[in-house]
């Protein structure tokens, strides 16, 4: 027989999990860490539980295998809830292990004891107390659940005294692929008339969403064959290259992309998930059809499509491929729409450092091709995300990591760390505001400890700028959004990373070029001019 902790780690490894992130308590987490060492799964000690779960969730998004995290009992578990909410709302495959106290019946205790599974239930596909006598098939089902559509997190409680107790085998199952292999003969049936509807469109628009991130080649091939105009969501950015002439805009549900949707005669939501839109009313007149890995329309998602095909996307994309290329959109019209879109969302001219200039320079001096590998961008929530995602050019799927469904701050650095661990020879760039950086500052030490190729760029204006914009638009008193200016470069240096501060436009490119020559983590603290955020937000969302 083999101990429960060993069974669990072995089951994850068999499903493709390579890292477990966390802050251990003194209970079952210690058994899990030992099991990781024996199984060849790397345990990554983080500085906070929220960051650990965010790293694990991003690891799952990048690999397609379940991400994994562990936390201690009580406060450790409570601190993990934000990360679990991210995984739930971002469709990230994840397993979270938490220590559990089982009070002895002769001497009950309330110390650190609360119903942990109940606290995770709203943000988990399942929340269970796993014991040595739990059936191995049930455990296998729980380890497979994160990658079942719609993907999401699972929470498992383990009592310290039971983690080392022998448990029955977990059935061996092949690691599930995100999609059937190319050329697979099994294809989900398309709704009657959907193929004719798509092929009959003169000006189709693809809204490419997070489910298509692992199918860049197939998605691009179908778009080109149909001559479709393309919009990508934030989480699908790069699935259609930002340099592709068919790519017109990013899709958020705002007003900036409305012109291309207004000109469409059919909107195809390809791998889109309703969590990728901001709340609002669907105003576009063109009929909508959808291809999805799960039936979000039946679950109440909007807009309500005329038809929805549910199943594996790859064979559906193959079935929709026309026998001969179709003309689709006029390329000159697409170019005009693209130019107008980019002009509309551009950051206004300002006296100080413009975020647009900063991001353009970042991609030129340290964020572009490094040793033949394009850097992967992780971007935090906040006003700075609009110019960052508008200017950063992504050419490949999964080139950008972004919290969209939850839109949590404190995301960019943990996500960049997960990227650097997943793909060590690919540079990672984290772009964050000063508010988001303060929420995960300790993880700089994690990056230093691991000697990761991570560049952190802080757009520093000593303000929660997005909330400041909303506060002023509502004509409220200015309160609760400004903070003391923090010297992030000095903090980075104190932690063992390279750090530098930029206050003038003339300093931007030399500072980025110098940082790119450094090894290990580096941080550039840029004092930007926030005065253009109001106009940019109006242009994007109306």
Image (tube, rainbow, N blue to C red):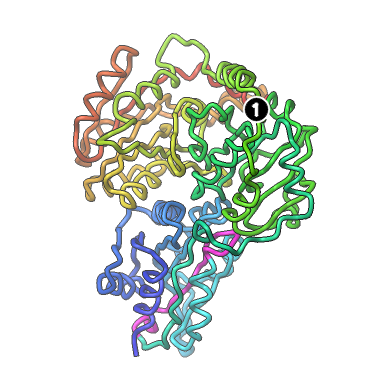
Q: Residue furthest front?
A: 324
Whether 468 is among the magenta residues is no
Residue under pointer 1: 257
Q: In the rendered image, is residue 367 in sight? A: yes
Would you say 524 lies left or right of 114 here? left
Q: Position of residue 170 (x, y in %)?
A: 44, 82
Quadrant containing the N terminus in the rendered view: bottom left
Taking depth in this image into account, of 32 and 364 the one nearest to the observer is 364
Q: Position of residue 276 (x, y in %)?
A: 61, 43
Taking depth in this image into account, of 140 and 75 the one nearest to the observer is 140
**Mark 1 packing: few (<14 Cα in 10 Å), some, or many (20+)?**
many
Relative to 439, residue 132 above or below:
below
Would you say 196 lies left or right of 178 here? right
Quadrant containing the C terminus in the rendered view: top right
Secondary structure state at the residue bearing disc 1: loop
Whether 160 is among the magenta residues is yes
Residue, x 38% and y 47% (percent of image)?
A: 414
Q: In the rendered image, is residue 534 in sight? A: no
Report how many numbered discs are placed on residues in the image.
Answer: 1
Q: Position of residue 321 (x, y in %)?
A: 62, 46
Would you say 240 lies left or right of 518 here? right
Would you say 98 lies left or right of 383 here? left
Q: Which residues are magenta?
A: 146-164
Relative to 178, residue 281 above or below:
above
Residue, x 73% and y 31% (percent of image)?
A: 202
């Amino acid at each position: 027989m083999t101990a429960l902790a060993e069974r669990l780690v072995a089951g994850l490894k068999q499903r493709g999990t390579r890292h477990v992130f966390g802050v251990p308590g003194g209970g079952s987490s210690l058994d899990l860490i030992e099991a990781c060492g024996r199984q060849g799964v790397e345990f990554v000690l983080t500085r906070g539980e929220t960051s650990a779960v965010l790293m694990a969730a991003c690891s799952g998004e990048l690999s397609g295998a379940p991400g994994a995290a562990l936390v201690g009992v009580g406060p450790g578990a409570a601190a993990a809830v934000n990360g679990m909410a991210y995984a739930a709302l971002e469709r990230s495959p994840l397993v979270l292990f938490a220590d559990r106290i089982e009070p002895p019946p002769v001497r009950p205790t309330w110390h650190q004891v609360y119903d942990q599974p109940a606290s995770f239930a709203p943000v988990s596909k399942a929340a269970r107390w796993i014991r040595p006598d739990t059936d191995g098939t049930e455990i296998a089902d729980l380890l497979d659940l994160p990658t079942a559509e719609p993907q999401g997190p699972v929470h498992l409680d383990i009592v310290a005294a039971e983690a080392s107790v022998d448990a029955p085998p977990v059935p061996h199952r092949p690691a599930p692929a995100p999609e059937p292999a190319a050329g697979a003969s099994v294809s989900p049936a398309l709704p009657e008339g959907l193929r004719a509807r798509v092929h009959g469109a003169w000006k189709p628009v693809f809204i490419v969403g997070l489910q298509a991130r692992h199918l860049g080649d197939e998605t691009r091939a179908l778009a080109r064959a149909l001559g479709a105009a393309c919009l990508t969501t934030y989480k699908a950015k790069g699935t259609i290259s930002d340099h592709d002439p068919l790519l017109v805009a990013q899709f958020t549900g705002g007003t900036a992309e409305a012109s291309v949707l207004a000109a469409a005669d059919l909107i195809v939501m390809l791998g889109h998930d309703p969590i990728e839109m901001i709340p609002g009313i669907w105003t576009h007149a063109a009929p909508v059809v959808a291809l999805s890995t799960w039936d979000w329309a039946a679950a109440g998602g909007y807009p309500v499509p005329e038809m929805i095909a549910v199943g594996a996307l790859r064979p559906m994309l193959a079935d929709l491929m026309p026998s001969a290329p179709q003309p689709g959109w006029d390329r000159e019209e697409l170019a005009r729409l693209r130019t107008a879109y980019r002009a509309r969302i551009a950051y206004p001219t300002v006296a100080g450092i413009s975020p647009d200039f900063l991001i353009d320079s970042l991609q030129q001096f340290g964020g572009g091709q490094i040793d033949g590998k394009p850097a992967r961008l992780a971007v935090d929530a906040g006003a700075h995300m609009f110019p960052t995602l508008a200017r950063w050019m992504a050419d490949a799927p999964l080139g950008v990591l972004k919290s969209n469904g939850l839109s949590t701050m404190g995301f960019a650095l943990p996500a960049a760390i997960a990227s650097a661990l997943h793909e060590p020879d690919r540079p990672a760039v984290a772009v964050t505001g000063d508010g988001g950086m303060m929420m995960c500052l300790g993880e700089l030490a994690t990056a230093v400890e691991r000697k990761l190729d991570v560049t952190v760029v802080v757009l520093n204006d000593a303000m929660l700028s997005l909330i400041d914009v909303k506060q002023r638009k509502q004509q409220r008193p200015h309160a609760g959004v400004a903070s003391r200016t923090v010297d992030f470069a000095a903090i980075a240096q104190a932690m063992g990373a390279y750090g530098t501060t930029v206050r003038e436009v003339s300093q931007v490119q030399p500072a980025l070029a110098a940082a790119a020559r450094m090894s290990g983590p580096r941080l550039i603290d840029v004092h930007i001019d926030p005065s253009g955020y109001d106009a940019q937000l109006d242009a994007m969302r109306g």
